[in-house]
Image (cartoon, coloured by chain):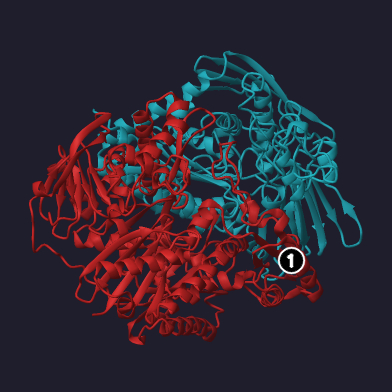
Amino acid sequence: MRYKLGIDIGGTFTDLILIAESGETTIHKTLSTPEDPSVGFINGIRELSEMNDMPFEKLVQAIDTIVHGTTVATNALLTLRGATTALVTTKGFRDALEMRRGIREEQYNNHYRNVEPLAPRHLRYTVNERIDAEGKILQKLDEKELLLLVRKLKMSKVESVAICFMNSYKNAIHEKKALQYLRKNLPGIFITASYEVLPSIRFYERISTTTVSAYVGPIVANYFEKLQQKLREIKFTGVLLVMQSNGGVVSPEAVCKNPAVTVLSGPAAAPTAGAFYSKMLNYRNCITVDMGGTSFDAALVIDNQCITGTEGSINRYRIALPSLDIITIGAGGGSIGWINEGGLLQMGPQSAGALPGPVCYNRGGELPTCTDADLLLGYLNPTFFAGGKLKLDKKKAEKSIQEKLASPLGLSLLEAAAGMYRIINSNMAQGVRQISIERGYDPREFLFIVAGGAGSIHASEICKELEIPMFLVPNVSSIFCAAGMLLGDLKHDYIRSYYTSFQSMDKKKFLSLFKEMQEEGLTTLSGEGVNKNKVTYQPVIDMRYNGQYHEVQLSCNWDDILNLRFDNIFETFHHEHNRQFGYSLKEEGTEMEIINLRLRVTGHNEKPQFLSKNTRRISASDAIKEHRDVYIPELNKMKKVPVYDGDQPIWGETIQGPCVIEKITTCIFVSEGYTCKVDDWGSFLVHEKTHSPARLKQAKLSAHAN
Amino acid sequence: MQIDKILVSLFQRAFKSITDEMSISLTKTTRSPILCEAKDFVTGLYDAEGRMLEQTENLPILSFSLGPVCKVILEQYGSNIHEGDVIIHNDVFSMGNQNNDVAIFKPIFAKGKLVGWSAAKGHQADIGGAVQGGYNPNATEVWQEAIRIPATKLYEKGKLRKDVWNLIFANIRLQMVQEDIKAQIGACTLGERRLQVFVEKYGLEVFEAHKQALFDSTEKMMRSEIRKIPNGVYEGKSMVYYDGKHKGTRFPIHAKISVKSDQIVFDFSKSSPQTKGFVNGTYTSTCSAITLTLLQMVNPHIPHNEGMLKPLTYIVPEGTILNASWPAATTFGNHLCPQIADSIFKALGPAVPDRITAGWNHLLCSLFTGTHVRTGRKYVDICFLGMKGGGGALKGNDGYDHIGMIDASGGVLDQDYEMYEIQTPHLILQHEYLCDSGGAGQWRGGLGTETKIWLRGNDTTMVVFGDGDIEPNYGLFGGKGSVLNKIELRYKNGKKIIPLNKDIILGIPDKTLYYQIAGGGGGYGNPKKRDRNSVLRDLKNEVISKKAAEKIYGLKTASKRKKP
């Protein structure tokens, strides 16, 4: 029997899903080991082998593919714990990174601050060199400059260096020279240059993306080095792939060249899985939310497609690489409760993560977190957390919430814990609002899919705030992203700047640039074990009418490119310009020009089959484990409710709220006024009792109509 | 009708997402860098009576004139408004704010009934008149500045009025302007399509009721903000230097602000009479300036619709520098905003010291025109990247660095350097923060910048317009003022030219060095009280000098200190 393994390492938990050829699925959750996440990685596989009664070595050798998502880069950016990074740039441009073109996102908010630059001003160095807009060298980069630079960099004890020179998209000779020189003379320091990260025009986009790459680079590279070493030690011979921000997967070697592609590695899998699930349930549109230990992600799937763009940023740091459109906010099980200057209770964005973790983990955490509140409110079972593997210390959690929050605020313990619960729910609801309402979509018309171990405790309150009548907790909810990783294809995005009008274009060059990207993609894919006949190409031309300043990213047909059928391309462009911008200049016969050529090379891999295990059923009432007190927000008090064992085969059953459904990997709180239906795959559909028939139907219909 | 509160907030966000989408469309389709890079434009939606539903105000100074013009159009055309009409307008004597700011309006119909308007207004690269680009310091009448376009149909029932189109564009120098107007029409079409779908989805009745509920809730928010200002009458003054014609002239701006419960009246009657040059405001540019200054002092999350404006009253008598009578020249009017803002902050300072900021850097800007040496194309470029100085500090926060004038508040982007070097023949040598440019204070003023550009081409013309090179931006409560604005040309032959703050320099030779300092913002509070770590950080980052750290901030020198 051969296996595929998906592993998603978050700030707090490491999620695993093992799928056999037969469709047999094992899911598992283990604690992350943030000091060296590869430890948790191997622990997880070991525990899976125990769960399957298989010797560890035998399981390892039976795994063909491991797809891995990591939040190493994401968390570094969110918590600003990346490498000490220097930036080397052209003389006269020291501040481009920090200026961010002089934008203030909130125009009328004078308390709104600029972001901390990833390379602080005292670590931004400039060198004498200059290339003009045509690629001509105006001032040569002198070796003496580099010698001086190396001395300064050594003194400043940086861990990483980003290089970005003016007009290097046109001529990268100086960047190449600097890169080689610094790499040679600064061993052990991570160094990257913009022509490797994003070789396209627009200085600010390039310098920002390159600096992000350098900022997360050492951490990411170091991590993969360790991980691969460990995999060799356990004699893993299959293929290791990494999830990227664009929803596709790549080899670790490709990641180390450009670590910025993994900034949304973990979260990108959720919409990928969301598209799969909503299709399975006959919906075209869904919202996926994923609440982990540190962050909360929300994404949209429209017409079963994840949404990709190059306008992305994280924590206001601009990353111009193609990535899925995902909103991330600092809210998770580890989010810390605190009191602000105004005496108001706040939750996050600081997180206790896995280490020291929530107070109740008893791993040295002292600050009260969301998980501590969930425990006090009865949602979590102190003896059955992660199936009982981690005993939760309720006393400690109580003490911490009492001392740090309840007493200073003059609240009872329950009031404080309930307050923490309500505030974090409202923070998450705001995240959902951002991705839906603020983009003009009504969240009530989307299937709301809840992922992440902690998400289903909080989902009903988020939904209530936004009047979403129902939500789905998929069978693999707690490890949703891990599952999504096995559903992703191998995707590589390439870009070449070629500024020319179509009229004066060198057709040979046009073709050869595409062929170059195709070759690069094919080589990379074959290294990743993909057969040539499983490869497809999606060319994109960044083009515009002559004289315009910004371009349209026009998806083209690969055959049209190969056969230089420009008329088809023009026709699509006029049409797309009209759709996006309300007009076209077709009738005027306006010439068009090119800025960049892009190629997405996709290697299609086999998708695993999820098996329905509805062979043996028991009634819900037989699955009641106990009754315990949980907090009912509608009543604003604790109430004794039944607790169901969600790992029992209760498929097809309907369960009335209020109740708790406990699984090893997650816990679902069905509040007063809600009903839960368990489907044939073991997924839970929770909806409002009162609105159910009409609203559900409406939601489903309009989702289809949308 | 039962009001669905979630639907009201959904309406608000949906309107905002439509006007945002219109703005993105304009950014992506226009050609003049003034529009597509600097975003000197606004997009908005208005209801059937011309009331503001929402706006995306990239540059707020042009924003608050769209509603009044919409009402002018409704009055002018009455029932003669049809689906497919496109109306153009720039006339400053019928509620336009500046000649160059040309608006396009498109009526929106749902099921045959007028339900609203989409509009886009942008600063055009040229608008006719005596000088390319529109800024003519020598102008004394509107016709020396621009072609006047009162509300005129460019399209009627979807059909282009080619003769009208030709008449207008025969009076404008650059072909580019036609293309950018097409882009504005396109953006309006987008807004039209989306609002149409929206109204049809919810039905007209639900739309009207929830729109009203949105206005009401917004008005309530604004009133509660005004109530936070103590009742009273407050006065503040500021000064405008030089009218572009008579050296050494000065013109006071005088704000008298009366707050009574939840109403506020801005009265500028005591300001200077109108000038003989082009340094004159228009009614709507002045109202915009007042509104955007007030918005800096209230909850920044108040939605921007008609409800927000209801508690405000403006008194700006005709014949003053802030509302010049026909046929005055007025192109500089938008740029009186910094002085208007100063006078308001100074007036309200004693009442709400926690809400006002120290002085923001005033605009001093240059506009280049010429022929691109490589492509032979004509270009017009406003040097936005060079003119953006620092914001004023306020209690609890440093001023924002390199944000630009208060009329934009960080909404106007610098040109991307690489795109700039393709679009113009020039080469950027430096664009960096200027050390010690932010006014010292417990909270430091935002940093200004230093810019050097190597000008290429033999027919470069530079128009300079602005202020802030005579009186520094003020500090507050012990905070210091900042450095002055400065522009200088260094010719290859050694000649140095320092233009006046309203000036025009012709025939700049090839390879001239352009040098500009954009000043910082004023500081707030005594600099000696500044948090020591912030002083050390600023020193380490070389945004304050060692001398300033010691002398002004009172930092003990590093050698005497053991550890920071």
Residue that label 1 marks: A154
Question: Residue A438 versus residue B244: which sits nearer the camera?
Answer: A438
Q: Residue at x 38, y 41 (%)?
A: A372
Q: x and y percent of residue B132 in the render?
A: 69, 52
Q: Residue at x 42, y 52 (%)?
A: A327
Q: x and y percent of residue B212 in the render?
A: 35, 29
Task: Using a 10 Å C-alpha cutoff, classify the residue at mark 1 as few (fewer than 14 neighbours), some (14 to 19) or many (20 or more).
Answer: few
Residue type of the residue flagged with mark 1: Lys
Q: x and y percent of residue A295 in the render?
A: 42, 50
For chain A, the rendered hue is: red
Vertical placement of A164 versus B269: above or below?
below
- Label 1 resides on the chain identified as A
Give the cyan chain's letter. B
Task: Tell me: A378 left or right of A252.
Answer: left
Vertical placement of A596 versus A668: above or below?
below
Task: Tell me: A386 left or right of B543.
Answer: left
Can the viewer see residue B369 in this picture? no
Q: Residue at x 21, y 55 (%)?
A: A704
